Image: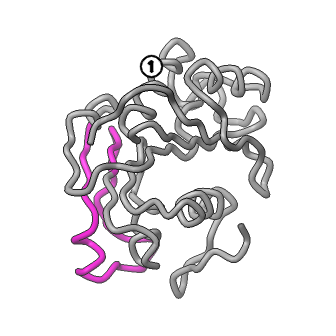
Amino acid sequence: MDNVPVLVGDTATSEDSCVHAVVESRGLRSICDLGCGDGRNLIHLASVGAIDFGFGVDAELHQTFEIGNIKPLPAVRLKLAFHKGDWREAEQFVPPIPFQLCYSNNVLEHLPAEDADEFIAASIRIGNGLAFHVLPIEKTHWDGKYHLASWPIADYRALLERHGEILDFGQCGNGNMVGLVKGSGRWRE
């Protein structure tokens, strides 16, 4: 996961590397990012040719369409769509290419614990049966103010298991937890 291509002037975080590795290793070309922030992961994946289409939704979307001071080429921007709104609104979006994965990068801990099951179930539906989530392994100074729930490893794994088969579960290089889950059922085409 450390050999992720990066844009000139950018660096890849451990979480970026984990997301990129899942997308690339499985040949996933259309993805949805719940809680995309400034769209960093989608912009990066589209810029290095890892995806053909990406959709991001965030209640506090920063529409700079930049990673730091790196502006993506117009051809890259055409591969992306962003929506400022609640993560629940992502299910209403119809992508030009059916989503093959829905992921979130450090989002679950910002939601009230009682929303966790709904969030995981929605991500699996949006990703047509496949979802990937990254979240902190330890409590931080953000807890209580921005982080509304803490997820010990066993609780996070149990949350994913309630919704499907865990295909991969572990930690990024910085210790953050990652989980790839395949839901059971029929999905949108």
Image spot of residue 88 (x, y percent) = 32, 28
Label 1: how many residues lie within 10 Å, few (<14), some (14-19) or many (20+)? few
User: Quadrant of the image for the C terminus?
Assistant: top left
In percent of the image, x 28 and y 59: which residue is there?
63
Front-most of 91 and 61? Answer: 91
Say how the picture is coloured.
Answer: one colour
The region drawn magenta spans: 56-85
Residue 78 in the magenta stretch? The answer is yes
Residue 97 location, x and y as percent? 26, 56
Indicate the position of residue 178 as horizontal and vertical percent values.
68, 43
In the orientation shown, which residue stands out farthest toward the top? 114
State the image quarter where residue 60 is shown.
top left
Horizontally, residue 37 falls left or right of residue 91, namely right
Question: Secondary structure under badge 1?
Answer: helix
**Residue designated by label 1:** 118
Image point (25%, 44%), residue name: 84
Is the residue 127 above or below the residue 39 in the image?
A: above
Judge by depth and name the residue closer to the eye, 15 or 157: 157
Q: Nearer the viewer, residue 58 or 120?
A: 120
Looking at the rendered structure, the number of numbered marks drawn on it comes to 1
Residue depicted at 46% across the width and 69% down the height: 45
130 in the magenta segment: no
In this picture, is 179 found above or below 155?
Answer: below
Q: Position of residue 96 (x, y in %)?
A: 20, 56
Residue found 34% across the figure and 49% down from its top: 99
**Image-based side of 21 in relation to 44, left or right:** right
Q: Main secondary structure of the magenta part?
A: loop
Kind of residue indicated by mark 1: Glu
